[in-house]
Image (cartoon, coloured by chain):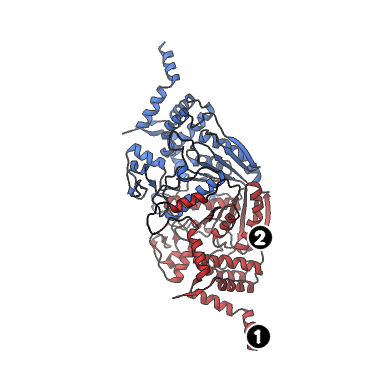
Chain colours: A red, B blue
Amino acid sequence: MVDVHTDLLTAQALAERLLITAGVPALAAAQQAELLVVAEAKGMPSHGLLRLPRLLRRLANGTASPTSSGCHTWMSPCYLSVDGQQGLGPVVAVRALEAIVPAAEQYGVAVCSITNNNHLGMLGYYAGRMADRGLVCLGITTSEALVHPWGGTEAMLGTNPLALAVPARPPLVLDMATSQISMGKVHDHALRGVPLEPGWALDAGGNETVDPVAAKDGSIAPFGGAKGYGLGLGLGAMVTFLTGAAYGTAVGGTLDDDHLSNKGDLFILLSGGRHSATEYLDEVRRSRRADPATPVSVPGDGARARYQESVADGIEIADDLWRELTRLDAARPDAARREAVLAD
Amino acid sequence: MVDVHTDLLTAQALAERLLITAGVPALAAAQQAELLVVAEAKGMPSHGLLRLPRLLRRLANGTASPTSSGCHTWMSPCYLSVDGQQGLGPVVAVRALEAIVPAAEQYGVAVCSITNNNHLGMLGYYAGRMADRGLVCLGITTSEALVHPWGGTEAMLGTNPLALAVPARPPLVLDMATSQISMGKVHDHALRGVPLEPGWALDAGGNETVDPVAAKDGSIAPFGGAKGYGLGLGLGAMVTFLTGAAYGTAVGGTLDDDHLSNKGDLFILLSGGRHSATEYLDEVRRSRRADPATPVSVPGDGARARYQESVADGIEIADDLWRELTRLDAARPDAARREAVLAD
């Protein structure tokens, strides 16, 4: 299997066309498509176009709403509760974040808790946008039970990713799952036929495996041993407690076609920075290296560099996936009409 | 070297007497002593009485104020900025937290950022207290540059601990350094003459070492590889940005006798829980075990069990440390007066 080379604009336009054909308004389609394409451009294919065919199936069967952008209820002037009403993840989340920015600027802190929302995609995208506007952003989301506890062998936790961005030039943008790997990466490995690394996953029986297909039915290890497990469980319990979302094995809807998405999302914005982080982060970047050829990097540096490369040189998409997307594109009623017009 | 066995009340009274003799008011002395003794009781000697002789030297030389409890400035109704005025860490932090509890209950979220405050001790103590009152608590504090970046070999980050507590019966209370180990643990190993484990630390030259004395002059590894490094740096940059505290190698005052403490502390409280976490955490505890003899535990379970054992059975204090404390106790002017009275 070879990858297909394309450029960002082509990929973005393709994703937008497919979403618009599925009934998504143009602006919302652009937002959703951007999340997927930027993930590809930043080197996170697990959160990229791989997710689009599922999203289209969900739009087709009603588990994702093409038009919802969430119902906003202010619990206080700086705490927004959002019922996502099964909208597209980025559409609901961007609207919620934009709504709390003024509150964060006025009160120093603001929160949005979101339920009934589809997959957000790459969390660092949201956090980075907020940091560009001078705000600290902490974003947490729960997900299907895929990760086994430290000392356990059964999938009981989501991969519960965490994004943290701190304003600086350039900002620090941390975006990490609290698992060794994301299930998106397992799927990507399965799609590409590449084995997992040892220690990443257990099969359904609780035994170690490097087979991504067996891992899909088993569980992923938490990152960083007991601490990473504690962090993932703590963040998941926090989001569940605050949002009222489903927990543990009852969570569904981000990795399947037909369950309503019942996980929770939480964002905390903080303003009032008193001390630029730029100088400190630059000191860290300049500090003594373990490998003389590789400078010390700050979270976000790698993704930023890959994004700039992708803007200049384009991206590689797995061949199977690209074929599926272009087949869907060719099958659009619009495409048929356009070909008919051209044939006239 | 053998450990000395004592009970919690004896240890608490000893610590209180020493602090009161150093000029600390009784209630503040009880708060500071409690942080140290509870750490011992929970099995975290690195944050226990080991810290008391240093604290007494700091009180003696003026780098810790016996009477400050912090100067409070409300930046908004839910954002409190605290100048700790070099008070004792727990005295300043408990007062700040108590001040923002009503705001968190009213607004759903409240923050206190603290500067110029001495060492907080065990962060989980504060978070657990808040969870007992139905609030989610996220606590972060920075510290001296002791941790090397992932891909670096020089101490550039604090061990930047994180506490996260979520209300439940019993609550989840996560309390972890973002380093493989805390520098307190390195000191405790040095005190007890126990080598470190491989992979925990580098010496001053950037080479791996298991010698705790060499590690004191070198650096500690971040936990969990690149992710743990990213988390520790992100949390540190966030606290520095928001508090205006010192960063990186400019931080001092929690591991020395004579520098003013210039790190930052940040607490975020969240209220409005909609979904008990108890049932979920119990499901995790009951889930399939890697070792049939060891149940899966939730953060805080181990510390809670150790605390209950310590209440019943007492605690073990390193012999050298206990001798130092009892020597200081015997040397108190009060002690001399009491003996003179008894001799009359």
What x and y, as percent, mark residue B70? 57, 34
Tell me the residue that label 2 is attached to. A70
Q: Decide if residue A105 is on the left or right side of residue B145.
A: right
Q: Nearer the viewer, residue B169 or A129?
A: A129
Looking at the image, is B71 positioned above or below residue A170? Answer: above
Say if residue B173 shows up in the picture: no
Are marks 1 and 2 in one subunit? yes
Tell me the residue that label 1 is attached to. A341
Residue under the image location 64 percent in, 42 percent down? B75
Residue under the image location 60 percent in, 51 percent down? A269
- The subunit carrying tag 1 is A
Disc 2 on helix, strand or loop?
Answer: loop
What x and y, as percent, mark residue A92? 63, 61
| Amino acid type for the residue under numbered disc 1 | Val
Q: Decide if residue A317 is on the left or right side of residue A109.
A: left
Q: Nearer the viewer, residue A61 or A129?
A: A129
Q: Decide if residue B89 is on the left or right side of residue B289.
A: right
Q: Tell which circle, 1 or 2, labels the residue nearer the N-terminal end.
A: 2
Quadrant housing the C terminus of chain A:
bottom right
Q: Are marks 1 and 2 in contact (CB under 8 Å)?
A: no
Disc 1 on helix, strand or loop?
Answer: helix
What x and y, as percent, mark residue A60? 61, 72
Looking at the image, is A15 positioned above or below residue B65? Answer: below
Determine the residue located farthest toward the top in the rendered image. Answer: B344
The number of callouts visible is 2
What x and y, as percent, mark residue A94? 62, 60
